[in-house]
Amino acid sequence: MDRTHGRNLALTLVAMAALCGCYLEEGPYERHHGTATLAWSIDGGREPAACAAHNATFVRLFIRYEDDGGFEDVVSCTRFASRYVLHRGWYTATLELLDAAQAPVSVPRDAGTFFVAQDREAFVTVDLTPAFDGGVR
């Protein structure tokens, strides 16, 4: 194959990729990823007994990307942290304690807004001590 044919083939492949919305990745991950660790405490600590004392078996995490969607994850209460690989950008999160049937046993707590930077880790902490003044019990 001569130089002209090689260049035409390359341009054709780029054009086809653009038309289908495809992109080429560098390695196993897209280049603009970072991580976020969301950690929680109960009664100011990270003791598994605190989960049991508040009838909490799980924690539900709602993670939202700017104003465009998000996802939910349910993890064991006694993990006291959960780590996610996320695209670069601004996020908000809400966490709440759940019982064994995944019914809420606390009011949802806002983790605030945080930024995930490329090749960096954002670390967010929230105290999930249940509020019982009219909250969920």
Image (cartoon, rainbow, N blue to C red):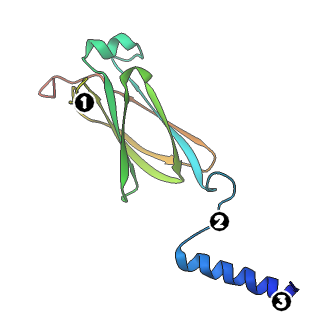
Question: Residue visible at 69% across and 58% down?
Answer: 26
Q: Which residue is mark 3?
A: 4
Residue furthest to the front in view is 1
Query: SS of the residue at dot 1?
Result: loop
What amino acid is labelled 1 in the image? Gln
Residue furthest to the left in view is 134
Q: Quadrant of the C terminus?
A: top left
Q: Which residue is mark 2?
A: 24
- Point out the tag, 2 or 1, that comes first from the N-terminus: 2
Question: Residue visible at 37% across and 18% down?
Answer: 44
What amino acid is labelled 2 in the image? Leu
| Disc 2: CA contacts within 10 A as few (<14), some (14-19) or many (>=20) | few
- Point out the tag, 2 or 3, that comes first from the N-terminus: 3
Q: Position of residue 127 (x, y in %)?
A: 35, 26
The residue nearer to you, when weighing 9 against 53, is 9
> Looking at the picture, does residue 133 appear above or below residue 22?
above
Asked if the residue under mark 3 is in contact with the one under mark 2, i.e. CB atoms within 8 Å, the reply is no
Cα–Cα span, label 2 and label 3: 23 Å
